[in-house]
Image (spheres, rainbow, N blue to C red):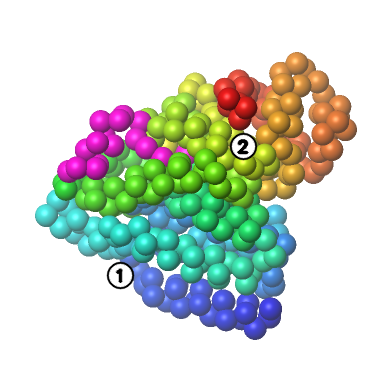
Amino acid sequence: MEFSIRNTVEILEQVHQSESTPRLKNEACRSKFFIHPHATPKVCLFLHGFTAGPYQFEPLGKAFFNRGYNVLIPLQPGHGLSGDWNRPNPPPLPTDIQIYQQFVMKWLQIAKTLGEQVVVGGLSTGGTLAGWLALEHPQEIERALLFTPYLGSHYLLFDWLIEILPIYFEWFNKNAPGNFGYKGFRLQALRIFLELAQKILKQAQTCISAPTLMVCSEADRAVNLSKQQDFFTMVVKQQPKSWYYCFDDSLHIEHRMMTKLEDNDYEELVIILAKAFVDSDLTWAQFQQMAKRIAQGETYENIKQQLNLDGQASQQLFAMMTQRFGCHHLECINPCK
């Protein structure tokens, strides 16, 4: 194991050397690794969103590192590169999903040398990749954290355009705070994730996934909330140790939900959910039961005794759910339908 860790550290150093500042769009796009000098009980592999970079998972990564886990947040293929990218010269994003799949499989093998159990997570298309990994290799994944995964666009018309048009598209919020990634892309580069989403939606009907946390938001106008709920409903039928949580529209938590840098004033809520899920063994039915008891005004001590809760993460989750940031959405997911 020590030799494997030594080799892995050398690999991570080589990655950092290859990501020299002139090659990258900016420092925020550099791969981020938070590594203890030894293997840890869990190791986290986080996958950033489409056209973005590892900066999206820095707060969550540091939270898990401080919890005693090793954390890998690699820059994905074709992302974060410097250049005068525009309509006639689009950024070099892959248009073959196998490039991403080979990438995450390589990093899964690296992650396994750094910890006893692997936690994989992702935002948006990174969440789609994490969902694929959890379905394809559930025996190698301890937990999967899907933050508003891209399973379809909020507007169905946009899915249709993605499927048929070979055009360059610029984000409507391209100049938003914290946007260190690309401002535009060819639709072909996003189409491969729409196709992957369709595949895993079908796969989830019959395949057992690793235990999965799905975090969504009513205020997210980028992705299809209904498809996220459908996906979770299928996952939890096969894997009951999965959770779903949807933030209320009043919080204005949009698609880029991982950091305050990207306009999520409730960044800490995402971190609380992730830590509680990774540290807990509650089933979806027990999680719903906890939410119901909280709504009825029961104390933490009573709920803790009944559901065998423990640790700071559970206390933080209780406090968060007491504030009603999204508990009422738990009842809309019924795996028995």
Q: Is residue 215 above or below residue 23?
A: above
Q: Nearer the viewer, residue 304 or 253?
A: 304
Residue lying at 68% horizontally and 80% vertically, measured from the top left:
2
The quadrant of the picture occupied by the C terminus is top right
- Mark 2 = which residue? 237
- Reply yes or no: does residue 162 show up in magenta: yes
Quarter of the image holding residue 320?
A: top right
Instruction: Based on the picture, tell me whether residue 206 belongs to the magenta stretch.
Output: no
Residue type for callout 2: Lys
Kindly identify the residue that appears in the image at 60 percent across and 55 percent down. 138
Q: Which mark is residue 234?
A: none
Q: Is residue 316 left or right of residue 262?
A: right
Which residue reaches farthest left? 88
Q: CA distance from mark 1 to mark 2?
A: 48 Å
Q: Could you tell me residue 7's position as x and y percent?
A: 57, 81
Q: Three-letter amino acid code at disc 1?
A: Pro
Q: What residue span does the magenta drawing correspond to?
A: 148-165
Q: Quadrant of residue 68?
A: bottom right
The residue most toward the front is: 206
Image check: 223 left or right of 239?
left
Question: Residue 44 location in percent, x, y?
Answer: 60, 58
Q: Which residue is mark 1?
A: 22
